Image (spheres, rainbow, N blue to C red):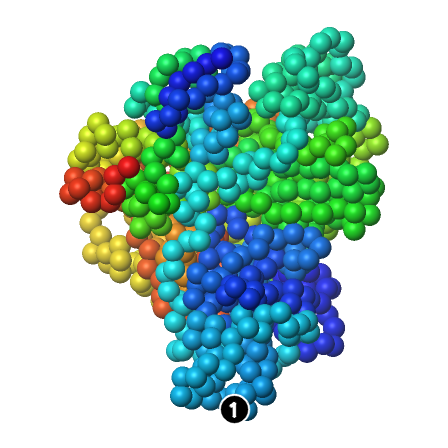
Amino acid sequence: MNLAYHMATGGGGDDRPRLPGSLHLNRRLGQWLRFHAEGRVTIRPGKVELGQGILTALAQIAAEELDVALARVAVAPAATPDSPNEAVTSGSLSVQECGMALRHACAAARAIHLSVAAQRTGVPIEAIRVEDGAFLGPRGEAVGSYWAQADEALLDCEAPPDARPKPAAARRVAGTSAPRLDLPDKVFGAARFVHDLRLPGMLHARVVRPPSRGARLLAVGEGALPGDARLVRDGSFLAVLAAEEHVAEAAAARLAARATWEERDTLPEEAALADWLRTAPAEEGVVAERGEAPPALAHRVRAAFLRPYLAHASLAPSCAVARWEGEALEVWTHSQGIYNLRTDLSKTLRLPPERITVRHREGAGCYGHNGADDVALDAALAARAAPGRPVRLLWSRADELAWAPLSPATLVEVEAGLDAAGSLASWRMEIAGNGHSSRPGRAQEPTLLAASHLAEPFAVPPAINPPLAAGGGAQRNAVPLYRVPHLRIGLRRITEMPLRTSALRGLGALVNVWAIESVMDGLAALAGADPLEFRLRHLDDPRAAEVLRRACAMAGWAGRARAEGTGMGLGLARYKGSGAWCAVVAEIAAEAAVRATRLWIAADVGEAINPDGVANQIEGGAIHATSIALKEAVRFDRRRVTTESWESYPILRFSEVPAVEVHLVPRPEEPPLGAGEAALGPTIAAIAAAIHDALGVRPRALPFTPEAIAAA
Amino acid sequence: MVAFTLNGRAAAVELPEAVPLLAALRGPLGLSGPRYGCGAERCGACMVLVENRPAYACTLPLGAAAGKAVRTVEGLGGPEAPHPLQTAFLAEQAGQCGYCLSGILVSAAALLEANPAPDEAAVRAALEPHLCRCGSHNRILRAVLRAAAAMREGRGGAP
């Protein structure tokens, strides 16, 4: 969903020597780091901070390879056109794509600087060591430093392919739990978010959103607006501008009451969602197929799994600031992909990309493709009415929950069976739903929300599923990691898109891992086997087996006692089939509703650059998944999404959060893998299994509310 | 003109009394700690202390703060003299995106002023009005309990 996406869709195929991660496509060293005479180094990653702590991990990697104190490393916010183009910060790939690029680039920069010092002083390069950026000869004499050589254009060159990063055993900074660089600002309330940006002469804007999907603005009644507020209209895009934020807010409310819209039914019947998923026009495909269907099966499980649309439900409504100067546009955004956003802004505004500067500023956690990109276009459209003035546009809570891209409702139907020996013999699975990506910058048409509301509107391209080599979308984690001779996974990507869908943390893994693990439990029961033992019997992957054993040991799985109204279940997956391994054991209490009480998690992310940061991401993902499992569903009628407040779209609160224990399998010698999404699928699966353990029913629809469990 | 005490200093704002306090704090008063999340008292991102009690700045009319003492996360402490809660949140690395933290910190401060020795259930109850979407809850609970212990022992650099 990122560089991996680019590579899997034909980019990056060239004859140049292969460089690690994003360095392959952004080869100039000076684009990645710069030394300053006053004793600092700035790194310039193309990946961005989303609350996941990536900037800290990247700074650690740089400090390690350069041998400078972490405090000397500054991280420049990503901006076009100078930052490396690393496409999108997504897919739990930032350490692999950006971290490994920086590791190589810093190792190369160190070697170049040392060779210059060696030439200059005659001290052999292998006799020079680096101590916090100072170059010392064999007797401890100073022979140079990054800072003394900072002004020289030493890094104005392509990264050499033969740079040699440190071996794992020599690392002292990467692999330690360095405190987050961004957290002090956040506990002191400093102005760190794009929401906090205050530029001279800045105006405030609000959008008056259509009342429903497909609504068309017919007229705006005459009448005064409060204060200095003024209206901006382009087709069905309606916004207000004012010097003070509260005036813009009041003006938007007044204008909403005065707008006349033509509305129509565009959404499927929510109560018949599974039917719509089965029958809506779709592109049919095969994700994986191997082996022959066995002539006979001793045991069989058939089951369907339904998940609703989900919202990202970021804590902050999306926000952007935009400013036009003549025919040039500058945008401050919490987008996950500044270049991709620039591409779609360029298409929508019919402005050459070189005239657009996109600067990243942090937002609240987004958990995937939320309203960040859409609000940037909204701000640009509003700001066009006030040339030279920066315009800050903030979405409403209702916009964030109901109008940001949603994670698609999906139906997964499985039929799997055992042979007479109790071994998995056949696995057939059909996945149906909209695609999982409407990311900007990839389709012919822009995917930004307001692009379809303009007087000259753009069609809304239906969401795609990235290829499996890039992690897939609906088909993410559709292939079980268990040994099975006959397998067929089919995929129906629905080609009409009544609700705009895009990537949410975990993508298809949320439902696929749950479906696979639930069926595995059902088969284990038919085989008379314990779920742990049954899985281990079908695992060829030792790292998967290890996290599974470890999580079960932490939870006391083998000796678990059965208490009335409680249950324990497990879930396992290797994220995307190529990422981190994660096993979760969940304990639940079945009260008026199901409550998750404890989670035991074992994860293997390869090399952990910052183990505490990894643990934080794994735990955060598991709590997010607990919320999805027990509470979350986007609701809608035939015209509008009706879950537009925290009351109608509740998420997990403090009183409902389970105790969580995380163990990381130490693997400093192995390549690093992402941590942000690995726990979600296994957590949902483990909670579903624990519900079965407690109540004897396997839930077949998310979220696992009393009604859903009763219907199972 | 509405006048009140903000983080121990006199403050005055030329805004209509019906405007939410949050608009005054983030607008003319130039603070960034109190944050807009929902505008409906459902997420706690905007929480401030009015006369030492948590209040939703997103809905509280500015006029209701007239003559009162308002405290925000900025008033708890800063990098030079952090509140024990801020120290504890950093020690526990209690946060991810951090958007919820300003509100959670002031609610926790009010809790510890009223109850210096809360158990975990009391901390959970005090933070129930607050949403954290990143899943940092358990770290946040540990940090509040850690700060409480530090304050009882007279450690942690009170403001």
Q: Position of residue A520 (x, y in %)?
A: 42, 55
Q: Nearer the viewer, residue B95 or A485?
A: B95
**Image coords of residue A334 (percent x, y):** 59, 43
**Looking at the image, residue A695 lies above or below residue A122:** above
What's the amino acid at mark 1?
Answer: Pro
The chain ID associated with circle 1 is A
Instruction: Give the image quarter of residue B57.
Output: top left
> Which residue is at 44% across, 31% downward?
B34
**Quarter of the image with the C terminus of chain A in it:** top left
Does residue B124 appear in this view? no
Q: Residue at x 69, y 53 (%)?
A: A80
Position in image of residue A512 (x %, y %): 51, 51
Which of the two residues, A246 or A389, is positioned nearer the viewer here? A389
User: Which residue appears at 79% of the width and 51% of the height?
Assistant: A354
Q: Is residue B129 left or right of residue A271?
A: left
Q: Which residue is mark 1?
A: A124
* Location of residue A325 in the rendering, given as x and y in whole percent from the top left corner: 77, 39
Numbered circles on residues, count? 1
Bin the neighbour count of mark 1 within 10 Å (Cα to Cα): few under 14, some 14-19, many 20 and up.
some
Disc 1 secondary structure class: loop
- Answer yes or no: is residue A257 visible: yes
In the shown orientation, is residue A149 left or right of residue A540? right
Quadrant for residue A391, please give it.
Answer: top right
